[in-house]
Amino acid sequence: MKDDNTALHVAIAVFVVTAVVFWGGAYITKAINNWSFGVQKADDETNYKTLKEVEDTCRAMISNYEADRLLYEQFKDSTDDEERSWAQSAKIRANKTASQYNNYVLKNSFVFKDNVPDDIKDELEYID
């Protein structure tokens, strides 16, 4: 009888340990990831390198957008089919850049802390 109880207790202990490892591991991993994200966000908020990288990326995207927008404006009313095709391609690129830029600024807005440089726009307009 004593051997049967010992085997039962060992089986229950193995089951409990297995359950804790499989189900508890997910919660522990989530807690660690949340903590790591908080640390990374605080570091990014104070890190000049991150600020410079975000600003430079914004400026490069604005430059690409403006080049495509101006190309579109130049050729949109052309009588030449090829030039109108260039305009359409430029419009598509400009709208894609605007979409990417707007998402990028939204995701990285915490970096600026309400101190956005004058040449960084809050949003790029889509071309209709």
Image: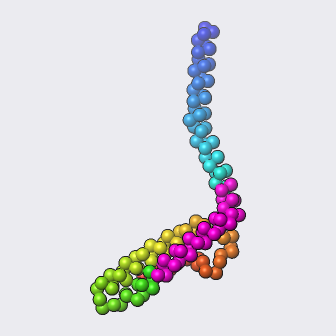
* Residue at x-position 69% and y-position 59%: 42
Residue 113 place in picture, x, y as percent: 69, 70
Point out residue 76 in the picture as x, y percentages from the top left corner: 37, 87
Note whether 95 is above or below 9 in the view shown: below
Q: How was this image coloured?
A: rainbow
Q: Is 54 a magenta residue?
A: yes
Q: Is residue 117 above or below residue 1?
A: below
Magenta-highlighted residues:
39-67
Residue 83 visible in the current orientation = yes
The residue lying toward the viewer, choosing from 126 and 47, is: 47
10 vs 77, nearest the viewer: 77
Indicate the quadrant containing the N terminus: top left, top right, bottom left or bottom right.
top right
Relative placement, left or right, of 79 versus 31 is left
**As rendered, which of 128 and 1 lies closer to the eye?**
128
Depth check: give the residue in front, 13 or 74.
74
Q: Residue at x 45, y 85 (%)?
A: 70
